[in-house]
Amino acid sequence: MALRIEGTRVTVCLPVNTPTETSTAGDVVRMLVRRYRGATASLLNAPVFVGSWEAGDGNVVLDNVALVIVDVRDRGLDDDTFLAELEELKGFVFERYGDAGSPQAEVWLIAPPISILIG
């Protein structure tokens, strides 16, 4: 019989277009591992995932992006403390990339509810 645990899967999209951004993405992964006792990440060295988005001038921008996934047990978006942690995470990403000379206009966190089946 499988054990079922509810939680939230947090996916963070991290730019890795330059060596500095790759190093910064590593900082974010290490922070997530410390905070949530684990994380799964794509490779941080390009080529990884390639995102594209339309800039304000109408040009399409290609972005090498690493994905980091953290399954957070027993926490949901109805938990104000957890929401505050996610805001802190976004702030950490903004700060780290800014300090590295690669300020970000947006930080994307995807956080759907999940059921984890163990057994």
Image (cartoon, helix red, strand yellow):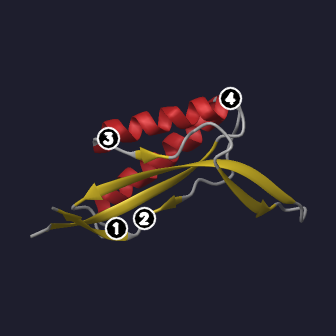
User: What whole-number distance in Å separates the C-alpha atoms at marks 3 and 4?
Assistant: 25 Å
Instruction: Determine which residue is flagged by label 4.
Output: 19
The image quadrant where one finds the N terminus is: bottom left
Question: Of the numbered discs in the image, which one, if any, rests on residue 35?
Answer: 3
Say which label, 1 or 4, has the lower sequence index.
4
Q: Is residue 60 above or below residue 94?
A: below
Q: Is residue 17 left or right of residue 12?
A: right
The three-letter code of the residue at mark 1 reads: Leu
User: What whole-number distance in Å separates the C-alpha atoms at marks 1 and 2?
Assistant: 8 Å
Determine whether label 1 and label 2 are within 8 Å by CB: yes
Quadrant in the rendering for residue 24? top right
Q: Residue 76: x, y in percent?
A: 30, 66
Instruction: Determine which residue is flagged by label 2.
Output: 111
Q: Residue 116: x, y in percent?
A: 25, 65
Instruction: Determine which residue is flagged by label 1.
Output: 77
Say which label, 1 or 2, has the lower sequence index.
1
Q: Residue 110: x, y in percent?
A: 48, 63
